[in-house]
Image (spheres, grey):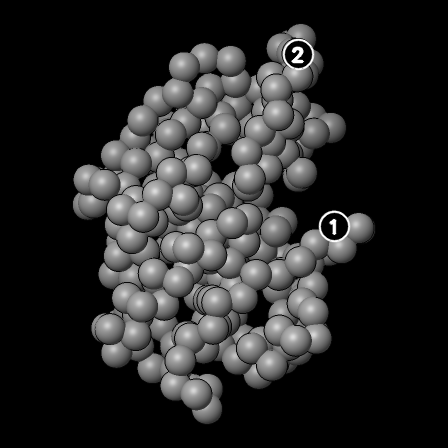
Amino acid sequence: MQEEIKIKSKTHSKVVLKAIPGHFVTPSSHVNYFLDMTTLKCRLSEALGAAKALGEQIASTTIVDSIVCIDGTEIIGAFLAEELTRAGVYSMNAHNTIYIVPPEYSNAGELHFRKNLVPMIRNKNVLILMDSASTGKTILKLARALGYYDAKISGISSIFSAANSVMGIPINALFTAADIPDYRSYNPEDCPLCREGHKVDAFANGYGYSLIE
């Protein structure tokens, strides 16, 4: 595993993506970079900067009742809700506010919502907020879960995305594959890094990585 590379947003200097080259196993794929977004999700100035940048992408086009936050993006989600509210984004819920909702993973890896959160999802316009969209599998799982409650996906925002859209819905991202031209995501069964004998450096998910030593 090599030293991290820092990539600054072209529009917001305080928004910095840290990319660590290596061979990483994620829940749905093998990737050749771990995208470390810890400070973006946990440091006040960076989380606020990310929220401002994401808000500018969607404020004029998206109706938002609830923001469903994946992999620890709740702080950015709260700032984003404030940015959208300040920009006059139209909310259709009875309380004239935007809910910040984290889903839960079942033991089988499916996403679901507890009963106390369902009123914030049912029949709502939902913005999906995530840290990274590489394969789109998490978005598909979440779309299935939201469909149980007749929620409508009004938009998808991500700090990084290797895809332009999922299910015909555009992904608004602060960083794309153009910022990391050699970023690759592979099916675990057909990973060229494995075939070439490159050892796996770490297991990774949206919360961090665990080195294999």
Q: Quadrant of residue 97?
A: bottom left
Circle 2 packing at 10 Å, graded few (<14), some (14-19), many (20+), is: few
Q: Amino acid at mark 2?
A: Glu
Residue 19 showing in the rendered view: yes
Is label 1 or label 2 in front? 2
Q: Amino acid at mark 1?
A: Gly
Q: Which mark is residue 109?
A: 1
Query: How far apart, in angstroms, are the residues tagged by discs 1 and 2?
Result: 26 Å
The residue sitting at 39% across, 86% down in the picture is 96
Please, what secondary structure does the residue beneath circle 2 have? loop
Q: Is residue 83 left or right of residue 125?
A: left
Query: Whole-percent x and y of residue 212?
Result: 66, 17
Please, what secondary structure does the residue beneath circle 1 have? loop
The residue sitting at 39% across, 62% down in the picture is 78
The residue sitting at 29% across, 53% down in the picture is 48
Nearest the eye: 183 or 157: 157
Q: Quadrant of residue 30?
A: top right
The residue sitting at 53% across, 80% down in the picture is 124
Name which of mark 1 and mark 2 comes first in the sequence: 1
In the rendered view of the protein, which quadrant contains the C terminus?
top right
Nearest the eye: 152 or 196: 152
Query: Whole-percent x and y of residue 32?
Result: 52, 23
Q: Is residue 36 left or right of residue 110?
A: left
Q: Looking at the picture, does residue 88 appear above or below residue 173? A: below
Per the image, the residue denoted by label 2 is: 213
Q: Is residue 144 left or right of residue 128?
A: right
Q: Looking at the picture, does residue 73 appear above or below residue 122? A: above
How many marks overall? Answer: 2
Circle 1 packing at 10 Å, graded few (<14), some (14-19), many (20+), is: few
